[in-house]
Amino acid sequence: MTDMRRTLLWVVFSMSLFLIYDAWNKHNGQPSFFSPVPAKVAAPSASAAGGLPRPAGATGGVTTAAPGAPPGAAPVLAEQTIVTTDLVKATLSGAGGTLVRLQLLQYPDHVQSEWYEPLLELFGRKAAPAAPKDVVLMDESPDRLYVAESGLIPASGGSGLPNHHTLMTLVPGERTLAAGQNTLQVRFESPVVGGVKLAKTYTFKRGDYVIDVKNEVVNASGTAVSPRLYLQLVRDGVPPPGESSVYSTFTGPAVDDGNKFQKVDFKSIEKRTPADKPDHTTDADSGWVAMVQHYFTSAWLIDKADGTRQPREYFTGKADMANTATGQSARVYSVGMFVPLGEIAAGATKTFDAKLFVGPQEEDKLAKLAPRLELVKDYGIFKILAEPLFWLLTQLHKILGNWGWSIVGLVVLLKIAFYWLNAKAYGSMAKMKAISPKIAAMRERLKDKPQEMQQEMMRIYREEKINPLGGCLPIFVQMPFFISLYWVLLSTVEMRGAPWIGWITDLSAKDPYFILPILMTLTSLLQTWLNPTPPDPMQAKMMWFMPLIFSVMFFVFPSGLVLYWLTNNILSIAQQYVINKRLGVLGK
């Protein structure tokens, strides 16, 4: 038992040092052990300058070239149009009518410097740059690339039809959602390319993060055509701004085939060769594709409300492409779908409607948009427990009206649910504390006889009717619930900008004055004092040292998470104090 405790302590201590080392690496521009593969930036090449094709997927395990500009074509500068609604400020490019920037007006960006950066400033290191006012989810800039593209390709593949490189004409109209207006439309029309004309109409709606995208395909040729529509999300592999160096959340593509939700990380795409089969479904007749990051997501949705089935082919891919903002080539990743539009007779027009969601991961709203779309909200491995805990948290919020007090209330309910289990654990620990002087004397007497010492220790446990694991097993039973609650609080976008009391104005940001982490550290030290003292002196020192080590992480955790742990500590201390006092072992 003693060896197991010592091993556990050293494992935790080693992991803490590893997390600090990883944070230091990330600050100095090295890849994090928990983050996706960073974008690879290289000097512009001839192919990049000519408009390097972006990834557009795999068919039957063979990577196919994306719709692209003709080889050797000179880069073109497309006019950009800014559209403003009550929720978003979107930028659409005349090149293919591509969504190249989207700013979330209801979500202030709270990108903060890392915990170690103030210390670095003392040594003359540069402080973190100021954060922009609002969250910019999509962007095409020197620092980031994340866009939503669509266009047409021939049934046989390749280019030759209007695509996201094609310069389109913007139809004049309003660009700001006026008071009393519920919808705003922006229309782009392409020239005839390969005998086909494509018109895209974006419809923005008040109070909605879903953008309706109508694709009108006009066959201006003299023969029938059978084009395919592609819808894709393209981004670099750089983690979103503000991601923590201490905890990691998933960033990357996701595919749902109507039956199964699959996350596809950037590393798996990077390792894939053109001959490899994608590690996700490729052919389906329902589902959606998405690009996921902490708190937010984007998704292409095409399923009809009446349940009509639409065959589609899913893909993920990688490529080096030219960033129009810098002229340099960078590694990007894509997820999307090909949709066959069927035969379009000469002179005929076919319309296909799609929806583009770009916004926060509000679980209830996502579930209504498409089956399993709420799964983009990452709950870790304890999803089966996290979902009911989130439901209970939202019910408490309806009553209390404050997410901070809802967190406190949820922890109280969990402590009540596990009251008797905790009572057994604390009772066992109190008995262990009571006999610790006897154990210490015995260890001193038999320190040169380890086997006899172990036998004597087990005899004392039997005489005192103490189970050495009695204080551990009840805690292990509860750990999945508290880990699940940890992931609920970490992934819930409703915490962004949500105040609690006084100085805590954003539960998803770290405590600006470190009051909660300091209280968390003090309560952890108090818990150590209430627990039985390990007979091994080294173990005893480690027990006091561990709260100080963990405090490093809590200083950078979101304040909502620290509030949850602090509340749990205070309630545990209260129960443990009462039990220790009743058994007369307080202060021993």
Image (cartoon, helix red, strand yellow):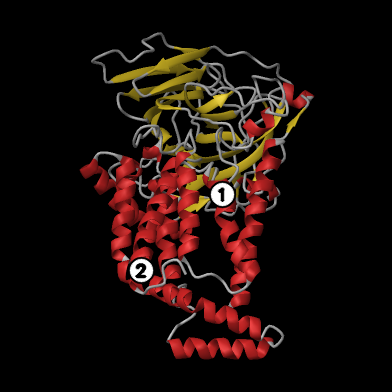
Q: What's the residue type where badge 1 is placed?
A: Val
- Across and down, in percent, residue 247 comes to 55, 47
Sort mark 1 into few (<14), some (14-19) or many (20+) by Cα contacts within 10 Å.
many
Name the outermost residue toward the top. Answer: 172
Q: Which residue is mark 2?
A: 581
- Across and down, in percent, residue 105 comes to 40, 23
Observer-nearest of 142 and 189: 142
Q: Which residue is mark 1?
A: 264
Q: Is residue 62 visible?
A: no
- Across and down, in percent, residue 497 comes to 39, 32
- In primary-sequence order, the first of circles 1 and 2 is 1
Q: Residue at x 66, y 86 (%)?
A: 446
Mark 2, secondary structure of its residue:
helix
Left or right: 475 with respect to 76? left
Sort mark 2 into few (<14), some (14-19) or many (20+) by Cα contacts within 10 Å.
few
Q: Residue at x 61, y 22 (%)?
A: 141
Q: Is residue 559 above or below residue 126?
A: below
How many marks on residues? 2
- Across and down, in percent, residue 428 comes to 42, 76
Q: Quadrant of the N terminus?
A: bottom right
Left or right: 45 with respect to 250? right
Observer-nearest of 178 and 305: 178
Mark 1, secondary structure of its residue:
loop
Name the disc covering residue 495, or none.
none
Mark 1 to mark 2 CA distance (whole Å): 53 Å
Observer-nearest of 451 and 11: 451
Left or right: 4 with respect to 563? right
